[in-house]
Amino acid sequence: MGGLPLGGYPWYARLILRLQRKKYGRELEPALIWGRVPGAFLMLTLLYRALDRDTSPLEPGLRALVQVRVSQINWCAFCVDLNSSAALERHATREKLAALPNYETSPLFTEREQATLAYAEAVTDPARRVDDALFARLRRHLFEQEIIELTALIAFQNMSSKFNAALAVPAQGFCVAGAQTPSGEAPTAEPGKIRNVS
């Protein structure tokens, strides 16, 4: 399963794809697939831009760590790859990305990061829930507006990573660091192999 010929997308989808080509040197595989549902693709792009804006109350590095961790839990090789690259651009270290599955015990993570990542895991993992103790821990480190925006970002990343993982969208080679499964192992997705549903 893949995208359409570029001329098969409406003008606004082609514009988004052109911007990706300018930023990344190529179109992103998930964008080519989402573009087949152009209205949803446009809304998805606008939602992400609203969550990842410069004026977000959450610092960019923390947002990137959350996105990598949610992507690891959902087994999304593409999302781990792209979000790890973003985390490095936002001043995370390769050591910190490698330690992400063990953030609770790693000295590389601040208490704020640990509380945020614990919340992200609880929201993402259907076997867990956000209990009162976890929420109280989060509130010690984040203000109300930060929690709302964090929850929206986690929900967005869950949708994105579950979509890509279900369709077996592979990593595109943006970043080797951070490319791990939930427990820290290397992913097994084959590059260039996208699930065909036809």
Image (tube, helix red, strand yellow):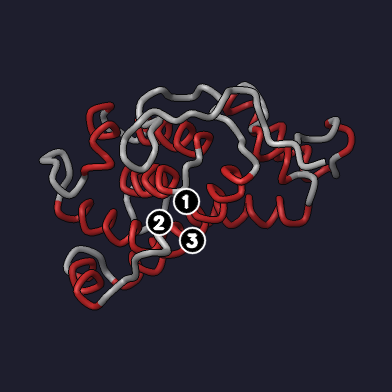
**Circle 1 residue:** 53
Q: Identify residue for label 3.
A: 155
* Amino acid beneath label 3: Ala
| Foreground residue among 178 and 19 | 178
How far apart marks 1 and 2 lie (CA) works out to 6 Å
In the rendered image, which residue does mark 2 sit on?
Answer: 56
Circle 1/circle 2 CB separation < 8 Å: yes
Point out the tag, 1 or 3, that comes first from the N-terminus. Answer: 1
Q: Mark 2 and mark 3 in contact (Cβ < 8 Å)? A: no
Which residue is found at the position 19% from the left and 74% from the top?
133
Q: Residues within 10 Å of mark 3 (few under 14, many from 20)?
A: some
Element under disc 1: loop
Q: Report the quarter where the C terminus lies.
A: top right
Where the N terminus falls, by quadrant? top right
Q: In terms of secondary structure, where does tag 2 sit? A: loop
Residue type highlighted by circle 1: Arg
Question: Foreground: 104 or 140?
Answer: 104
Residue 10 % position (x, y): 85, 44
The quadrant holding residue 167 is top right
Q: Position of residue 93 (x, y in %)?
A: 26, 29
Q: Is residue 126 left or right of residue 122?
A: right
Q: Secondary structure at mark 3?
A: helix
Choose mark 3 or mark 2, whichever is in front: 3
Mark 1 to mark 3: distance in Å? 16 Å
Q: Residue at x 46, y 63 (%)?
A: 152
